Image: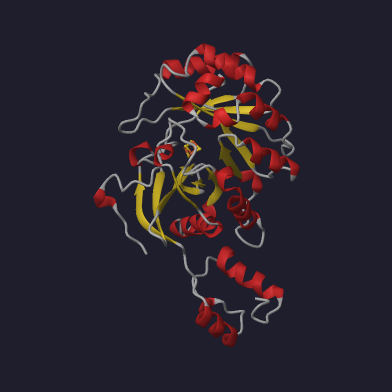
Amino acid sequence: MIGLGQKPYRGRQIARWLFAKGCDSFEKMTDVSKSFREILSRLYSVDPLLTLQADESDQEGARRLLWRLSDGEMTESVILKEFNHHTLCVSSQVGCRMGCRFCRTGSMGLKRQLTQGEIVGQIIRARELLQPSPESLTNIVFMGMGEPLDNAENVLRSLKIITSPDYLAFSSKHISLSTVGVVPQIQALSEQGGLKCGLTISLGSADDDLRSSLMPCNKSWPLQKLKEALLSYPLPKGRRFTFAYVLLAGVNDSPEQALLLSKFLTGLKSKINLIPFNPWPGAPFKRPSPEATAAFQDVLLDKFHTAQIRSTKGASVNAACGLLAASQPVSENRIAERA
Ligand code: SF4
């Protein structure tokens, strides 16, 4: 706006129209003079960046949104219904280079980073889809496609817009960023005072050899280095780290593995989400039995950890944890093309 001879407040005014009100045309920005709106319309267009390619729901209230980006790449978001509010699981990349073997996205490799606009755009467009109650979208989790700390610059910039009271106005308390534990980025965040939002660390195993075989990132940032980085991380007051542990039948679901996890967590403020594996066609792992899952949880509870078993939502539409792969819709007749 300064480049166009305007005062800085004009930029904030237009940003409010775009982000807080989801305005899709300069014409509708009624507190901007008509002559300046005409200049803006001549010079720029409001581009939603994401075209809804498919919108599928399952009976448990998970809604998988498949987005086509302006260069033809695809990414996904998932809306999860929880009682009277919604959580949006957003993607930060197209694909992912981390290669976690239990994750379908990991098998794609990294295609490209999502821009700040494409990250924020997922939220704006999800709000549109939740009309007439866009305010029911209260929680954001960076747990879609991609490793957020492998695209830290754009993710951190998007967080500013997402949490700004003038723009999307989400509470940091209701945002969580999920990472495999990119140690240099965690250290960089610590130096900057840490994030106000929550941090979830995907663990997979608390045994270095097993973790390295499941999550190649562990070769670069082994468990001890990860723990040191987390111990130095300035958690916001009253918050704990969340550790996500995908349970794989016969691989990392034994009571011995639970004891190793308990030992790793000693000294860390933590809670644990146990996620029974969601199989996909050709996946090299199986889902553990409910009994094995419960036995793993019992070991942790006996050691006084907070450990929950997460219910699987969205598996029937490939929207459950670890299943996002920008695949075409599960059922062709449920495609909803909405430009
Ligand atoms: S679990 Fe996350 S970091 Fe690992 S491959 Fe999947 S998307 Fe990437």
To which quarter of the image does residue 168 belong?
Answer: bottom right
Depth check: 135 or 316 in front?
A: 316
Query: Does 319 sit left or right of 212 as displayed?
Result: left
To which quarter of the image does residue 2 belong?
Answer: bottom right
Q: Position of residue 49 (x, y in %)?
A: 46, 62
To which quarter of the image does residue 176 belong?
Answer: top right
**Is 274 located above or below residue 10 in the figure?**
above
**Is 287 located above or below residue 193 in the figure?**
above
Pick the quarter of the image with the C terminus. bottom left
Q: Position of residue 237 (x, y in %)?
A: 74, 38
Query: Does 72 sit left or right of 184 as displayed?
Result: left
**Is 333 located above or below residue 318 in the figure?**
below
Depth check: 226 or 141 in front?
A: 226
Query: Does 189 sit left or right of 300 as displayed?
Result: right
Q: Residue at x 65, y 41 (%)?
A: 185
Q: Position of residue 97 (x, y in %)?
A: 48, 41
Q: Residue at x 65, y 72 (%)?
A: 11
